[in-house]
Image: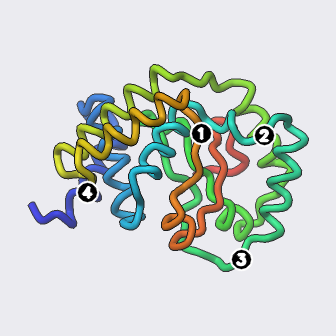
Amino acid sequence: MPHGLIAPLLAVLTVVPGCMLGEKERYVALLAQQHARYPQMEIQDVYKHAYEASHGSTHMAASDEQAAKYLLGELSALIGKGNDPLCEPLVPSGQLVRFHLRPFVQSGGLPEDLIAALVQTRESFTPSTDRLERYWGYAEAAAAEGTLPFTIESMRAYFDARVAEGYPAVNHSRRFLMVYRPAYRVVLRKHLPMPC
């Protein structure tokens, strides 16, 4: 099968009702989608994906007021239209997503609705280091299978360094920030201010 068809096929298989793919296969499919959309992503970006999938947005701000202030500042500084989807699933169930700000604003979304969704997500999502380790294991498997263009040794070295640091939140890689200009929030789908 041509390599260019793998990510779209996996994307379909992750959302087809009754599909018998397990959690590992569905998470690897999500990573394949990410790499197809963001081919300049680096190992740091894979870790950020796994971190957000396992910890949600609990690392964003010390208080709801700070999170709201930061969001309003970011919304007012958005430049360009971009071609981001409204949502990108972070977890195999699709219940936790990256909710992109540019299409939200372009669709007439109200900041106060998104702030409410962020507060609800923060109050109802339980972070899990065990889940982070499990998702990272799936990411290493994706690298070993060739779904991600990184060596298993470089993946393990990166993760071992984060473990030694106590599993910190990280930003996107410098390359990812420069090329893709990400602007999103991590939100539970059930709290989204608009369907996606």
Rate crowding at label 2 as few (under 14), some (14 to 19) or many (20 or more) other CA atoms within 10 Å: few
Where does residue 132 sit, x and y in percent of width and height?
46, 29
Measured in 3D between alpha carbons, the distance from the residue under mark 2 to the one under mark 3, in whole angstroms, is: 23 Å
Residue that label 2 marks: 61
Please state which of residues 137 and 109 is positioned toward the viewer in this rendering: 137
Q: Which residue is mark 1?
A: 169
Indicate which disc, 2 or 1, sits on the residue closer to the N terminus: 2
Point out the tag, 4 or 1, that comes first from the N-terminus.
4
Give the number of the disc on residue 79.
3
> Horizontally, is 13 left or right of 100 in the view?
left
Whole-Å distance between the Cαs marked 4 and 2? 33 Å
Which of discs 3 and 4 lies nearer the camera? The answer is: 4
Viewer-side label of 2, 3? 2
Q: Which residue is denoted by mark 4 in the rendering?
A: 149
Of the residues shown, which amino acid type is indicated by label 3? Ile
* Picture quadrant where residue 119 is located: top right
What percent of the width, then of the height, locates residue 19? 26, 35
Amino acid carrying mark 1 in the image:
Ala
Question: How many C-alpha atoms fall within 10 Å of the one at disc 3: few (<14), some, or many (≥20)?
Answer: few
